[in-house]
Each structure stands twice: as structure tokens, then as C-alpha cells.
Image (cartoon, rainbow, N blue to C red):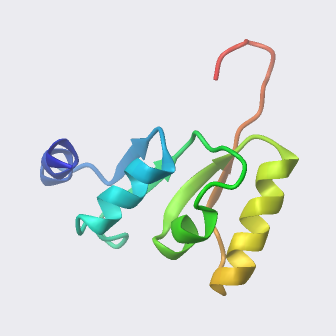
Amino acid sequence: VPCARAAVAAGATWLGTATPEEALALRAAGLPPEQVRVMCWLWTPGGPWREAVEADVDMSVSGLWAMAEVREAARAAGRPARVQLKADTGLGRN
């Protein structure tokens, strides 16, 4: 959280996290979506999708299973989800 605050103070408008728990911790620490977007890219089935939708966390989706979970989370939260689609273009990188 201290590093994220320093980045935002220096002008960052987007932050990235590996896990949803890290993204949710940034929101819980008071980094508002009006000031900074937070994106998380590593998800597992059954993750805290609804909490992420409610906290305005952008989510990276790389499979149909994940898209289905995001869709259900958005319905449950009563609001749209912000999604980035990941595509394997054959470079073997994530």
C-alpha cells in the first residue's frame, strides 16, 4: 500500500496487482476508483469476483470459465464489470 500511494502521488492513474486480494487491499486502504484504476490479472476459480466488481477492480480474463464467473459476479453486484481480455497469440508469454 505505501508503494501504491507513492505511485499515485507521483501521478500514476493505473495500478496493477497479481492477486485479487492485493487489489481489494488497495481499495480498502482508501485508493478510490475516481483517482486510480486497479487491475488484477491472476485469478482462480471461485475467486472474489463479486467483491472485485463492487470495488471497481478491473479484471483480466483469459478463459470462458473466468468470463462466466465475472458475468455472475456482475449480476449479483447489480453493476457492470470492467474486463480486460487476455489472448495467447503464440508467443508463450503471459
In the image, taking residue 61 as reference, residue 4 lies left or right, namely left
The answer to whether 16 is drawn above or below residue 90 in the figure is: below
Tell which of 43 and 5 is nearer to you. Answer: 43
| The image quarter in which residue 87 lies | top right
Q: How many marks?
A: 0
Residue that appears at 77% across and 72% down: 72
Residue that appears at 69% across and 55% down: 46
The answer to whether 17 is drawn above or below residue 83 in the figure is: above
Q: Quadrant of the C terminus?
A: top right
In the image, taking residue 16 as reference, residue 62 lies left or right, namely right
Q: Position of residue 55 (x, y in %)?
A: 46, 71
Residue that appears at 62% across and 44% down: 43
Q: Position of residue 58 (x, y in %)?
A: 54, 58
| The image quarter in which residue 82 lies | bottom right
Q: Position of residue 26 (x, y in %)?
A: 31, 57
Residue found farthest to the top: 91
Residue found farthest to the bottom: 78
Q: Position of residue 90 (x, y in %)?
A: 81, 15
Residue found farthest to the front: 46
| The image quarter in which residue 28 lies | bottom left
In the image, taking residue 9 as reference, residue 16 lies left or right, namely right
Residue found farthest to the right: 64
The answer to whether 94 is drawn above or below residue 13 in the figure is: above
